[in-house]
Image (tube, rainbow, N blue to C red):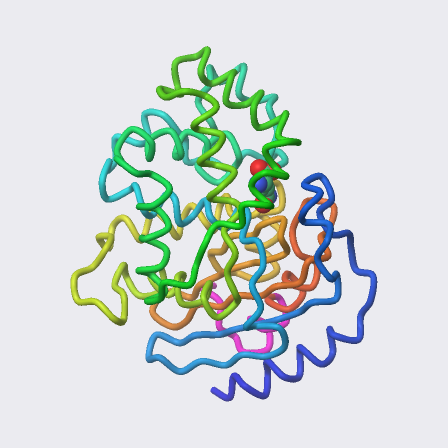
Amino acid sequence: MDYSSVIQEIYADLKKKQSVGKVAAYIPELAKVNPDKFGVTLLKTDGLHYSIGDSKEKFSIQSISKVLSLSFIFPKIGEAIWKRIGVEPSGDPFNSIVQLEYENGIPRNPFINAGALVVADIILSLCKNPKEEFLHYINQLVDTDLITYNNKVAASEKKHGYLNAALANMMKSYGNIHNDVDEVLDFYFHQCAIDMTCEELAKAFLLFANQGELTHQKKPLLSKSQIKRMNALMLSCGFYDESGEFAYEVGLPGKSGVGGGIAAIYPKHFSIAVWSPQLNQKGNSTLGMLFLEQFTTKTGMSIF
Ligand code: GLN
């Protein structure tokens, strides 16, 4: 399969499109990004990779971090995690609070904000130095030490994070947050404020295409069953109330973030990361979705 010419063709075609959405502005620091950035990296499980555009430039991974925080903690806590978080799509926006009350403070899934806040709470309970250990884990996935928190983005989100504070407080009142609410929020804002490139993200997500194994380390980090569950959750819940649309258009497990990134995987074949900061109304990258739709349609490489 000549991935490189398909990638070049789609990239050149989409690059011509302008004003395809809005950069996230509810976190003021994110609004500073150049809206025309566009990068792609495809990484195959055999190590071959293809990059184009701004694939070496760091951007805020935001909600893509929710997959990595879950994969960090899942092997440590196991199936017990599902007593505190569900595995159903929410059908609601990522920061919605409505379901939480009538579902007694149990978030629908780990990839909406409420679910990721519970995951953050579990990380605080299980780790001595949560922020350091989580960052170390991500650097380990990518086989680097260059990945860091962007403190400006974290501070900007903290300043405007009223809704996340409301979610965390409501869950605290239901007993589903065990640590101090401010500490949970601080961890969550930092995990979202990690900067990565498309190349780094594709490398991190290769874990999910590669049955829980890293190419640079022998011992698997997650079991095959855990990888099955992680990928199922990405497919059903990775794009909030646009998860059905993403499965329909693209047909791969994946996860988006309001920084404009999308990471997706085809089990046993490849991971792919796309970055374009202009978002559609559901908070997902417009060009990112278009790129992946055309990519899986032209190559036939979707799980369906
Ligand atoms: N940090 C963002 C928030 O909590 C993440 C949202 C996203 O990327 N969808 O609002």
Point out residue 127 in the picture as x, y percentages from the top left corner.
27, 36
Residue at the spot 30% in from the left edge and 32% down from the top edge: 81
Image point 74% across, 74% down: which residue?
15
As drawn, 144 above or below 106: below
Judged from this view, the residue extending furthest toward the top is 173
Can you give x and y, in whole percent of width and height, for residue 75 in the image? 24, 44
Classify 68 as above or below 303. above
Q: Tell me where residue 286 sits by quadrant.
A: bottom right
Can residue 115 be seen here? yes
User: Camera-side residue: 106 or 251?
Assistant: 106
The part of the chain drawn in magenta is 293-304
Quick check: is 298 in the magenta stretch? Answer: yes
Residue 38 in the image: state x and y as whole percent: 66, 69
302 displayed left or right of 279: left
**Closest to the observer: 55 or 268?**
55
Residue at the image position 71 percent from the left and 39 percent from the top: 26
Residue 153 position in % (x across, y down): 60, 45
Q: Residue 200 vs residue 75: left or right?
A: right
Residue 219 position by quadrant: bottom left
How many marks the image carries: the answer is: 0
